[in-house]
């Protein structure tokens, strides 16, 4: 059963119990789908990182990426499992790269971190939020 179907099923049960309308049920299903898919991604990424012995570096990469994603909106895939697979690949790769860099000289790590962080920040300032086929920007979005 897909996360979408699970969310719709839970929303229908809650709507029936709370005597809510169809519109409220759809909104609840949408929110539940976002929550369930996010929790699933988090569990898959962190448990994979734990088994690969890169948990702490992957957690830092995930927290850093998440904070930038709030600004940029992130990449959107047409399918949940593509999103999960791509996120898993990126986060585990970043976790492993961070682990490799930690083992290298500290000065190089600090310079690298500063350059990457500053670059990411400037890129977000210049191009975030970005329009994509799934989310057309309005004047409210561009502030």
Image (cartoon, helix red, strand yellow):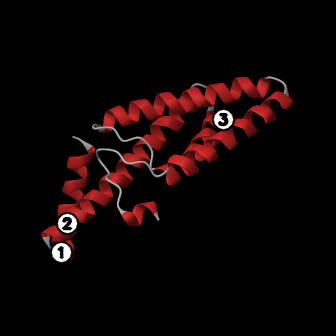
Asked whether, in this view, residue 114 is left or right of residue 128, the answer is right
Give the SS element for disc 3: helix
Residue nearest the observer in this picture, 14 or 95: 95
Q: Is residue 85 visible?
A: yes
Q: Which residue is mark 3?
A: 57
> Looking at the image, is 120 positioned above or below residue 96?
below
Disc 1, disc 2: CB below 8 Å?
A: yes
Q: CA separation, marks 2 and 3?
A: 39 Å
Return the disc, 2 or 3, that comes first in the chain's sequence.
2
Residue drawn at x 45%, y 35% as measured from the top left = 87
Q: Quadrant of residue 86?
A: top left
Which callout, 3 or 1, points at the residue further toward the start of the chain? 1
| Residue displayed at 44% across by 60% down | 142
Where residue 88 sits: x, y (%)?
A: 47, 32
SS at mark 1 in the image: loop
Q: Could you give the CA–CA distance between mark 3 and mark 1, rounded to whole angstroms?
A: 44 Å
Among the two numbered marks 1 and 2 on one chain, the one whose residue lies closer to the N terminus: 1
Pointer 1 residue: 20
Percent coordinates x, y for residue 130 in the rendering:
43, 48
Q: Could you tell me residue 76's position as x and y percent? A: 36, 41
Q: Which residue in the protein does label 2 denote?
A: 25
Q: Are marks 3 and 1 in contact (CB under 8 Å)?
A: no
Q: Is residue 96 above or below residue 28?
A: above
Decide which of 29, 50 is in the foreground and name it. 29
């Amino acid at each position: 059963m897909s996360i979408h179907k699970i969310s719709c099923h839970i929303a229908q049960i809650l709507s029936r119990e709370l005597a809510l309308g169809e519109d409220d049920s759809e909104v609840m299903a949408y929110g539940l789908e976002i929550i369930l898919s996010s929790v699933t991604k988090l569990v898959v990424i962190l448990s994979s990182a734990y088994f690969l012995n890169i948990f702490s570096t992957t957690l830092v990469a995930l927290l850093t990426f998440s904070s930038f994603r709030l600004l940029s909106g992130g990449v959107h895939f047409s399918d949940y499992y593509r999103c999960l697979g791509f996120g898993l690949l990126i986060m585990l790769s970043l976790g492993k790269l961070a682990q490799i860099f930690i083992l290298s000289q500290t000065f190089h790590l600090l310079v690298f971190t500063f350059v990457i962080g500053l670059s990411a920040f400037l890129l977000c300032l210049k191009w975030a939020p970005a329009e994509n086929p799934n989310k057309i920007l309005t004047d409210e979005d561009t502030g």
